Image: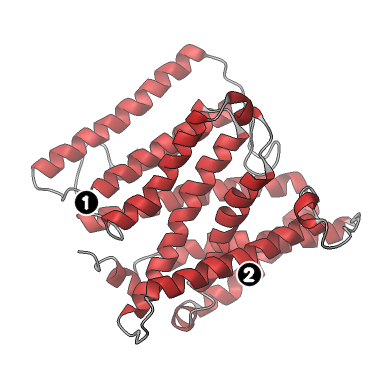
Amino acid sequence: MWLFGRNIDLTTLFFPVWAVWILLFCIPSQTLDAEIPLWVWVVGVLMIDVAHVWSTIFRTYFDKAEFANHKRLLGLAPILCFVILFTVASESIDWFWRGMAYLALFHFIKQQYGFFALYSVRSGAMKVKRYISDKFAIYLSMLYPVLFWHLNFRDFNWFVDGDFIQFQMDSLLLWQILNTFYWLILAGWLTDEIRLIKHGSIRLSLGRILWLFTTAINWYLGIIYFNSDLAFTLTNVVAHGVPYIVLIIFYQSTKQADSSQKKISPTLAIGSLVIIGSLFFAFGEEYLWDLLLSQDKQELFGSWITYPEITNTRFQAIALALLSLPQVVHYVLDGFIWKMNDSNPHLRIMMKLNE
């Protein structure tokens, strides 16, 4: 079973991640250890990571029916998030970024679980009893690399240096043993999956199996195997951002497929709108980040306008809260707009389209 169809799933959900792995194993170590090139930042961070955040507005604020279904949430979320962000930023920049890092980590983990759950719904595996639960396996695939990160100093961070709480546990033998158990448990889950398929308890879902092991390998490579900012950034943003944009496009296009009278494909039309619109907003956001706060991408943005020198801490806190708002609101909304309940009637319909 697949989410959007075999070809779409393979080419958009899996191949981009696998291509990143091939690239990382092919490039020389000095490139891995070097600072991330500007063009990689533009493609990976701006065009994928930041753009996927903005794609949420096409599923919410720019969709009349969806806005009506979530009117209170969409109205209150930005206000409450700004108040919290500004309050924390005013008190401590360090704790602001620490909170942002753990919030982002939680969001990234929940998205991987969410896609896995969608695969499970389509394969009929949600309520089947098993020796190693689906939830345990998918969370283990990500939380073990995160645990390793917290107990081993790495040459990268999520947002800024020191955002994650760090301890040091120098024991090569211990980590070798834990790494082995990590893969043995996941292999045990696969064995259990094959058993259930043979007994007819669940339907074969290659997409479901690929999603779990692509997630596990991706987090293992990005955090444990490679100790590289470039490797972590690429594995992180591609596996997270690309599937989300595809989900937004597929969701919106299927809503209009039946009612569309146009010759142009709804997927092509909506996909173009979502991608171009998201890139526009992402570029604007990153320009403001660099103009008002970070000022480390002047080679890209600096020729447009003279950069100001901002020294007022209160203004910095306001700018930090406002510019972080799209990201945090995206995190909050995602906790509601993908639940299969009465507020999201089309989601259940969408999940049956390819059966």
Which SS class for mark 2? Answer: helix
Horizontal arrangement in the rendering, residue 176 relative to residue 227 (left or right): left
Q: What numbered label is drawn on residue 153?
A: none
- Front-most of 300 and 141? 300
Q: Are marks 2 and 1 in contact (CB under 8 Å)?
A: no
- Mark 2 residue type: Pro
Callout 2: 10 Å neighbours few (<14), some, many (20+)? Answer: some
Callout 1: 10 Å neighbours few (<14), some, many (20+)? Answer: many
31, above or below 207, in the image: above
- Whether residue 257 is visible: yes
Q: Residue sitting at 48 percent across and 76 percent down?
A: 70
Q: Residue furthest left?
A: 199
Q: Residue sitting at 36 percent across and 52 percent down?
A: 11
* Image spot of residue 190 (x, y percent): 24, 36
- Whether residue 294 is visible: no
Q: Residue sitting at 57 percent across and 50 percent down?
A: 104
Horizontal arrangement in the rendering, residue 46 relative to residue 148 (left or right): right
Instruction: Name the quadrant of the N terminus.
Output: bottom left
Which SS class for mark 1? Answer: loop
* Image spot of residue 262 (x, y percent): 37, 85
- For marks 2 and 1, give the CA distance: 36 Å
* Image spot of residue 320 (x, y percent): 75, 57
- Mark 1 residue type: Ala
Quarter of the image where one finds residue 324? bottom right
Q: What numbered label is drawn on residue 125?
A: 1
Q: Residue furthest front?
A: 263
In primary-sequence order, the first of circles 2 and 1 is: 2
Instruction: Name the quadrant of the C terminus.
Output: bottom left
Quarter of the image where one finds residue 144? top left
307, above or below 39, in the image: below
Residue behind mark 2: 78
